[in-house]
Amino acid sequence: MEVTEDSQDSEISRLHSGAAHVYGSFSESHTDLGNPKAEDAKVSPRRSYVAAAVLCYINLLNFMDRYTIAGVLLNIQQYFDINDSTSGLLQTVFICSFMLLAPIFGYLGDRYNRKLIMI
């Protein structure tokens, strides 16, 4: 049996059109549910501003934890009686360890149980 390019194209278009029957599927038993196409969907300007504001707020919260030591550094200096260079080293070590460990724990958190990772 010879397979021509036209028969391959028709088979591909039949598979992409949803006309192919897959065992256990209901693809032939229902019609399109009226989902809007991507080019037909429109977002109101207000909704886009709200979405941008929410993303900015989430980004703000994401970066706040990196500056927790900087916000309380004077209190740490007074409590532990350390000088400016030692407190600067403390801030540097915190940021560098955060920079190195965040991608590692992000990877682990995506793939494994987060409760176990936090322990």
Image: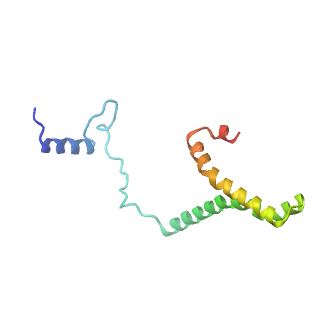
Residue at the location (60% across, 47% down)?
Answer: 104
Residue 72 at least partly seen = no
Query: Percent from the top left, x then y, of residue 31?
Result: 31, 44
Nearer to the camera, 66 or 83: 83
Residue at the location (18% across, 45% down)?
Answer: 9
Residue 110 at least partly seen = yes
Question: Going by the image, does 87 lie left or right of 48?
Answer: right
Question: Going by the image, does 78 lie left or right of 61?
Answer: right
Residue at the location (71% across, 60% down)?
Answer: 92
Residue at the location (42% across, 63% down)?
Answer: 42
Quarter containing the C terminus: top right
Question: Going by the image, does 2 lie left or right of 33?
Answer: left
Query: Percent from the top left, x then y, of residue 101?
Result: 64, 50
113 in relation to 68, above or below:
above
What is the quadrant of residue 1 in the picture?
top left
Taking the view exactly as shown, the residue that stands out farthest to the left is 2
Query: Percent from the top left, x then y, of residue 108?
Result: 59, 42
Nearer to the camera, 95 or 46: 95
